[in-house]
Image: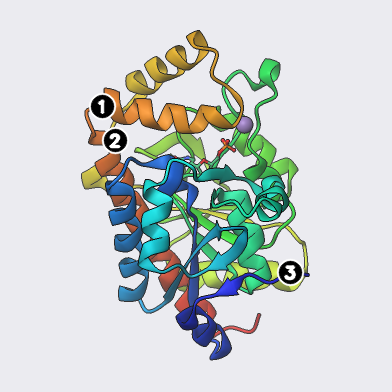
Amino acid sequence: MIAPILSPDVAAALADRRPVVALESTIISHGMPWPQNAETALLIEAEVRANGATPATIAVIDGVLRAGLDAPMLERLGRDPGVVKASSRDLAAAMARRATAGTTVSATMLIAERAGIPIFATGGVGGVHRGAETSFDISADLVELGRTPTAVICAGVKSILDIPKTLEFLETQRVPVLAFGTDDFPAFYARSSGLKVDHRFDTPAELAAVIAHHRALGAGSGLLIANPIPAAHALDLDDTIASAIAEASARGIGGKALTPFLLARINDISGGRSLVANIALVRNNAALAAQIAVALAHLPL
Ligand code: PSU
Ligand code: MN
């Protein structure tokens, strides 16, 4: 099986069994505008370090799978319009073409697993889109969560998605959904989606114990850990999201272009307020992921 190229600090941390947190790169290439995307990538890495772990941002650079990127690579992901979006099914084609790609949650999970990194922090995962009963638009992130054992720390899913259907799909895929410090499944900009989770945990150490048990079971599926946006940054963007969705459908935007289109429109319509919230919640997730990784480093895997 192919292994990604590790940066020297990620390689050293893994060799010493020190905590490492994987980070995705579609959020850089297709989730935020330049230059905030590259600035945020560095801020998130700093947040992981400040909480005692080594960050491993994952991407495909000139056809090479990488875990741990240098500053020029991060800048290229954020700035170069030729960078493509790769979910797990796109990786082989990107490698063959020597393409440079931001990796989605699904692709990042797969590469993190090949690198031996069990924990990954992001903002929001993909899910079941609204109208999926006719469009069939369900993110590969959910299927990858059903078959790759990485624990993904996120702020829930955005209401660009059908959140009840997304949670049903995760149940079908045998993915444990855990919430940190809340009984509710969060909805990205909002601290609650109005839906409950089955499993609430209040400390990183307990979450690490669940991850260790889940992996020991060999169930094969990943875990989704939902961490609500800090209260000071929470926003109600339901109307903004609804107009972005209406615009996408009027313009016939679908497939892999849909999520990036919606994220960019939400940012424009909200006058950049969504971006401030997005950055805050990703930092919060990176910090929690690092704390869990530190606790996990003390447990047998
Ligand atoms: N949701 C966000 N920000 C993002 C994404 C989703 O709030 O940047 C990105 C992630 O990389 C996620 C991907 O894995 O979009 C899902 O794309 P799709 O819906 O096409 O599967
Ligand atoms: Mn899709």
Comparing 161 with 78, the one in front is 78
The circle drawn on residue 270 is 1
Report x, y in % for residue 229: 34, 47
The circle drawn on residue 63 is none
Tell me the crowding category of disc 1: few under 14, some 14 to 19, or many 20 or more residues within 10 angstroms, Cα based: some
Question: Residue 187: in sight, yes or no?
Answer: no
Which amino acid, by three-letter code, is at mark 2?
Answer: Ser
Does 242 sit above or below residue 100? above
Which amino acid, by three-letter code, is at mark 1?
Answer: Ser
Comparing 101 with 115, the one in front is 101
Q: Which residue is mark 3?
A: 2
Which amino acid, by three-letter code, is at mark 3?
Answer: Ile
Q: Specify the quadrant that holds the C terminus.
A: bottom right
Q: Is label 1 or label 3 in front?
A: 3
Q: Which residue is mark 2?
A: 274
Q: Is label 3 or label 2 in front?
A: 3
Q: Are marks 1 and 2 in contact (CB under 8 Å)?
A: yes
Q: Specify the quadrant that holds the N terminus.
A: bottom right
As measured in the structure, the alpha-carbon distance from the residue carrying label 3 to the one carrying label 2 is 38 Å
Residue at left offset 30%, top offset 74%: 50
